[in-house]
Image: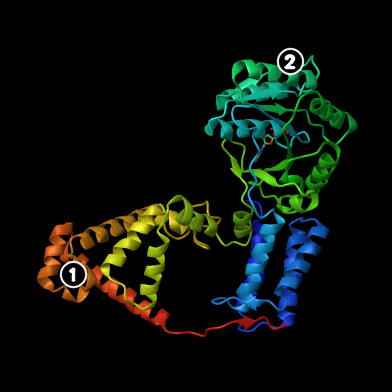
Amino acid sequence: MAFDSLTEKLQNVFKNLRSKGRLTEADVQEALKEIKRALLAADVNFKVVKDFIKTVQERAVGQDVMNGLNPGQMVIKIVNEELCNLMGSETTEIKLQPGSAITVIMMAGLQGAGKTTTTAKLAGKFKLKGKKPLLVACDVYRPAAIKQLQINGEKQGVEVFTMGDNHKPANIAKAAIEHAQKNGNNLVILDTAGRLHIDEDMMAELEEIKNTVTVHQTILVIDAMTGQDAVNVAKEFDEKIGVDGVIVTKLDGDTRGGAALSVKAVTGKPILYVGMGEKLSDLEQFYPDRMANRILGMGDVLSLIEKAEAELDIDEDKAKEMSKKMKKAQFDFDDYLESIKQMKKLGGLGNIMNMLPGLGGMGMGKMKGLGDEQMDEAEKGMARMEAMIHSMTPAERRDPDLLNPSRKHRIAKGAGVDISEVNRMIKQFNEAKKMMKTFAKPGKKGKFKLPF
Ligand code: GDP
């Protein structure tokens, strides 16, 4: 995966920062120097790196350290936020025309960047969203490109419009839009010809398409493997024909990733999607914040939070109440049950572990350390726990001290488990409570300042 080496270097910098109780100005300067080196080694544009370090430094100076963070963590937080800003801070969607009006997207890019593949990938995404795309073969110089688009279109179940290699691309685009109007296609994606290098003919051809038909979105496809060159290409394309958004391909390879980090800062144009493999499903929407987390090796924490808050509608009040109870160590079996429920809403233990920093690698892979079987076992254990709590009376749930041997027998029977399992759960529960009491002890409060 791209960024592996950058992540490793940044993690070393942060490990050093964290290992220090107090940070001196020299510590922070040294860390910034290391971060700068790591970004340059990842092939991030030199000016972008310079500005980035300057911003982090400015923000770090005199910054109040938030409650609960030490100065080292505060620096990490700032780096994380600035990486996210660098990549555009917010997710950008491809703008579609309202209602049933046809949206015309023109794909541009150098030969080999992944344009034809990405065109088909994109069509698949929009098809899933209920659009009826029409792919248009405007690359008339390489018959293989027309064939490739046809094959990929077929795989995606999307219609492909071709007129062979004997017509001007602008005329093909015009005919394709007329076809779309008759045929009920509401999204037309033009796959244009690339060249090995930027040249006048290619630009003129793209311009001619734009002058002949209404192109609503021009999307540039760049190859992450080509690093700085990709960013320069993006700049030129944008200056000559105007680009609305960028798709960075081949981020699955062992590219250093600098193009993805620099392109927004250099061109001002957002990354819309990233290509993560050769398969037609390997296209991911681009989330700058998640990417920043991944680069810092912090796992896909954001996905977890977002899942918790938005999609799954976890009751905020309940969560607050629970955390209050935990702090006071007034946690009972009802709360235990509630936390199991919330965990299930988040997709189960495996899913959560996968998204937590340090456990799930990049938030996408399999959890390190625990295999599928152990995971299964843990999930089953949770289900049995739930059954046992359900077999308790409300009074028992609130006051576990009531659980004498005969009550425990009744619970074991009700849940279909052995009494030893009931005992084990009560023991675990009491231990968890004890641990919460330790955490709940008042620690140092108030704000810390970074030491410069
Ligand atoms: P075009 O000349 O710009 O149309 O490029 P193609 O679509 O033909 O892609 C060139 C090569 O890159 C093909 O072998 C694709 O399979 C490959 N490719 C495209 N996108 C990705 C990607 O995201 N990851 C990987 N690993 N390969 C990709």
Q: Residue 207 in the image: x percent, y percent?
A: 83, 29
Judging from the image, what secondary structure is the residue with disc 2 in?
loop
Q: Are marks 2 and 1 in contact (CB under 8 Å)?
A: no
- Is residue 2 shown left or right of residue 357? right
Residue at left offset 62%, top offset 34%: 122
Q: Is residue 18 above or below residue 172?
A: below
Q: Position of residue 266 (x, y in %)?
A: 80, 51
Query: Which amino acid lies under the numbered mark 1 shown in the image of this protein?
Result: Ala
Decide: is 114 above or below 172.
below
First reached walking from the N terminus: tag 2 or tag 1: 2
* Label 2 environment density (alpha carbons within 10 Å; few <14, some 14–19, many ≥20): some
Q: Is residue 186 above or below residue 420?
A: above
Q: Which residue is mark 1?
A: 395
Q: Is residue 355 above or below residue 144?
A: below
Seen at 74% across and 75% down, the residue is 30
| Three-letter residue code for mark 2 | Gly
- The quarter of the image that holds ligand 1 is top right
- Residue situated furthest left in the rendering: 406
Residue 245, numbered label: none
Helix, strand or loop status at disc 1: helix
Q: Which mark is residue 164?
A: 2
Measured Cα–Cα span from mark 2 to mark 1: 78 Å
> Which quarter of the picture shows residue 49?
bottom right
Q: How many marks?
A: 2
**Observer-nearest residue: 71 or 280?**
71
Q: Which residue corresponds to the image point at 40% horizontal and 70% vertical from the top-left?
A: 323
Q: Quadrant of residue 221?
A: top right
Q: Quadrant of residue 319?
A: bottom left
On the image, the x and y values in percent for residue 367 come to 47, 56
Residue drawn at x 18%, y 61% as measured from the top left = 391
Near mark 1 (Cα within 10 A), the count class, few <14, some 14-19 or many ≥20, is: few
